[in-house]
Amino acid sequence: DVKVTQSSRYLVKRTGEKVFLECVQDMDHENMFWYRQDPGLGLRLIYFSYDVKMKEKGDIPEGYSVSREKKERFSLILESASTNQTSMYLCASSVDRGEKLFFGSGTQLSVL
Amino acid sequence: QKEVEQNSGPLSVPEGAIASLNCTYSDRGSQSFFWYRQYSGKSPELIMSIYSNGDKEDGRFTAQLNKASQYVSLLIRDSQPSDSATYLCAVDNYGQNFVFGPGTRLSVLP
């Protein structure tokens, strides 16, 4: 079975902290994505990656960075967390471009 | 900026009725269209994909695509309370990633 695992289900951080959100997929997928989901706004793409060490900005990359050192792992980094980054973060992967997404269970991040 | 629009709902239908969910998109060049279902507190899961004009049926679900009108819909026949969820429309973005609509919340009343 396809599996995308996000390291934390709930996370509470303080303003200004550096935050790491980890995502691992076991399907040998080339493509990985980070979305955030907010009520009324749907899913918005933060960053995506088509290959190891490769990254592309999505629609809302400001305040975020990513790392993909290994094919199966895609990390989202909040350099200095702010309250407006409180959100549900969803990691996803796909076997190829334009193919369906497999989502992780999400990380609900609260920045106080 | 590509846009995908959906009525946010909630859309309420009685058990056994047909639920009709609609989605419009702004980019005529889009080729792939997906419907995801998301239960409260859970992550989205794929229900249907459609690539060509017309209807595509899978069990109680039918996806309809009209590229000329830039419109894609999802019909759920014989709606069940277990269908109560938020339905997300996703449209491909030059084959690189997807733009999601805000979702329509469906409530099926017993």
Image (cartoon, helix red, strand yellow):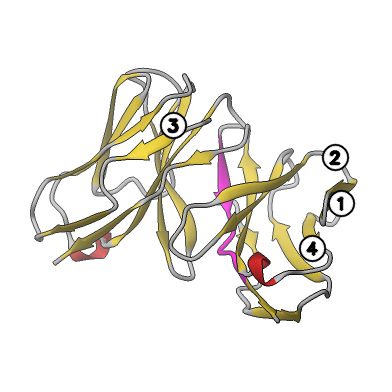
Name which of mark 4 and mark 2 comes first in the sequence.
2
Q: How far apart are marks 1 and 2 (CA)?
A: 11 Å
Q: Nearer the viewer, residue B100 or B104?
A: B104
Label 1 secondary element:
loop
Which residue in the protein does label 4 denote? B76
Residue labelled with disc 2: B52
**Disc assigned to residue A14:** none
Residue located beneath label 1 in the image:
B68
In the rendered view, tell whether residue B74 sits above or below residue A76: below
SS for dot 3: strand
Q: Which of A72 and B17 is in front in this view?
A: B17
- Pointer 1 and pointer 4: residues touching (CB < 8 Å)? no
Callout 4 amino acid: Ile
Identify the subunit bearing mark 1.
B
* Mark 4 residue crowding within 10 angstroms, few (<14) / some (14–19) / many (20+): some
Distance, label 4 to label 3, CA atoms, is 30 Å
- Between the residue at mark 1 and the residue at mark 4, the CA separation in whole angstroms equals 23 Å
Going by the numbered disc 1, the residue's amino acid type is: Ala
Residue span colored magenta: B97-105
In the rendered structure, which amino acid carries the disc numbered 2? Ser
Residue A99: x and y in percent read: 63, 32
Contact? badges 1 and 2 (CB < 8 Å):
no
Q: Distance between the residues labelled 1 and 3?
A: 31 Å
Question: Is label 1 or label 2 in front?
Answer: 2
Q: Mark 3 points at which residue?
A: A32
- Mark nearest the camera among 1 and 3 is 3
Instruction: Sort mark 1 into few (<14), some (14-19) or many (20+) by Cα contacts within 10 Å.
Output: few
The quadrant of the rendering that contains the C terminus of chain B is: bottom right
Camera-side mark, 1 or 4: 4
Residue B33 located left or right of residue B100: right
C-alpha separation, residue under disc 4 versus residue under disc 2: 19 Å
Q: Residue B102 magenta-drawn?
A: yes
